[in-house]
Amino acid sequence: MKKHVFYALVAICFLASCSVQQGLTRQSAYPNMYKEQPLTLLIMPPINNTTHVNAKEYLYTTLAHPLLEKGYYVISPRLGMEILQNEGAYDAELFVDAPLTSFKQFFNADAVIFSEINKWDKQGFGISMSLHYWMKSTSTNEILFERNCDLYLDLSSRSSSNTLLGGLVDLAVSTAKTLLTDEVVAARKANIYIFKDLPHGNYSPNFGLDQEIGVDKQDITITLHQ
């Protein structure tokens, strides 16, 4: 009996050591974030590789909030969009592989947020998205943070009216609004999951204190419910 207990303890210790060796922390996953400590972020308009023409706007207008909550100063997306359009720099594709020093000089941005929409479809009773995000330094042009997210927002549990008349009224009055809300909710939830492991910025009380927090793998696949 004692032998079984001994072997069990050895196995547990071995698995624990493997977990520690293989586990990533924010410091080991994103060392350049702690090295450069970006303060001001500029969000570029998303690159839309889908036929969903409004997906770009849904994603762009919901990107700032999780970054602000993480403690970063984010240049107003509305102001940034206006300036980029006036300067003929609206297409983020032009700057993916280009030096970003001009954004440092013009916006005083320490890093630029890029995003790419590879899928955005109504699928079954929900919305399916495939998104790619990355943050690049305007000083070194290095990628500071990068994540991919395949997210499915399940809407099947949404409550509905119990009567035919109620259902018809709801359909006539709020269908468009509901669809819009679903798209925005999907974008917001994707952004939260993308940036949940991003190291905290200078304006966060947790700045410089989160290096040892574990992180998920770079590619996230998740199903959420509204």
Image (tube, helix red, strand yellow):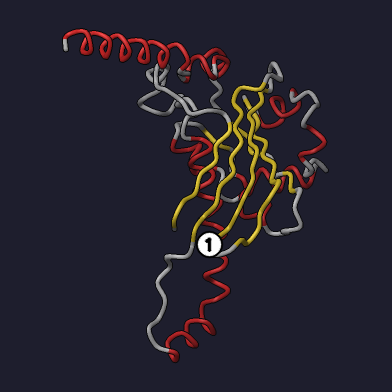
Q: Nearer the viewer, residue 116 or 126?
A: 126
Q: Is residue 151 left or right of residue 208?
A: right
Q: Nearer the viewer, residue 59 or 25?
A: 25
Quarter occupied by the N terminus: top left
- Establish if 63 lies above or below 186: above
Q: Is residue 54 left or right of residue 223?
A: right
- The image quadrant of residue 87 is top right
Q: Residue furthest front?
A: 1
| Residue 162, x across and y down, in percent | 37, 83
Q: Determine the residue positioned at 79% across, 40% down.
A: 89
Q: Nearer the viewer, residue 188 or 168?
A: 168
- The image quadrant of residue 97 is top right
Q: Which residue is mark 1?
A: 182
Quarter occupied by the C terminus: bottom left
Q: Determine the residue positioned at 42% across, 17% down.
A: 211
Which secondary structure, mark 1?
helix
- Establish if 189 lies above or below 99: below
Q: Determine the residue positioned at 56% across, 44% down.
A: 63
Q: Determine the residue positioned at 50% across, 31% down.
A: 72
Amino acid type of the residue that numbered disc 1 sits on in the rendered structure: Asp
Q: Residue furthest left?
A: 1
| Residue 65, x across and y down, in percent | 49, 44
